[in-house]
Image: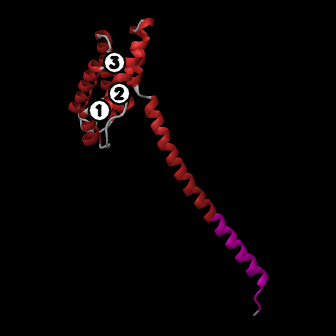
Amino acid sequence: MKINNSNTNISKKIVVVTLFAVITFTLAGLVGVTLLSDSSAVAQERERERSDPITGCFKEVGETLVAPNGIQNWTESIQNFDSLIPADDTLTLINNNVVGDSGPVADIPGIWYVLINGNNTAHDRQIVLDEVDSLLASSKPGFTKIQQDSLSKCIANETNSLGPTPNY
């Protein structure tokens, strides 16, 4: 019995080419999934920053309750408020023990991140809101009483719009 070597060689070539194609597409898929998951994490972080309604509260109150000649004080008050956030022990404690993130809350979007975390209870959220009110009052140069009340109300409304968490 005679074996045809040309058919055997062609079959081996087809198997090798097919195997190479499968490996190439598999590797490309793994790289694509890795890149997509990295991109997804970056996109989620950007979305979190974009969707931070507390920053929106500052913008809204600034547009309605700040006279044109008070813009500099308003801007300084926001900067001072922002600078107080990382030093707040209560926010850091909630961030570390409830949210499970390590370190202090760094900025205004960080406060929102703490508030939206599913590990919070109603009590935790209220403590955060109380701390925000305290920081608003501590900012120097400070916000006027009307501005503090408006910011506090806006932030509380945004928080209440979240609804309960699984631990609520």
SS at mark 3 in the image: helix
SS at mark 2 in the image: helix
Disc 1 versus disc 3: nearer the observer? 1
Q: Is residue 52 above or below residue 59?
A: below
Which corner quadrant of the image does residue 114 belong to? top left
Q: Which residue is mark 2?
A: 83
Q: Residue at x 33, y 35 (%)?
A: 105
Label 1 or label 3, whichever comes before in sequence order: 1
Q: How is the image coloured?
A: secondary structure
Query: Which quadrant, please, contains the N terminus?
Result: bottom right
Q: Position of residue 163 (x, y in %)?
A: 30, 29
Q: Is residue 73 above or below residue 133?
A: above
Q: Is residue 61 visible?
A: no
C-alpha gap between disc 2 and disc 1: 8 Å
Residues drawn in magenta:
2-22
Q: Residue furthest bottom?
A: 1
Badge 1: how crowded within 10 Å, few (<14), some, or many (20+)? few
Q: Which residue is mark 1?
A: 87
Q: Is mark 2 in CB contact (under 8 Å) with mark 1?
A: yes
Provide the major secondary structure of the magenta segment: helix
SS at mark 1 in the image: helix
Q: Which residue is mark 3?
A: 154
C-alpha gap between disc 2 and disc 3: 21 Å
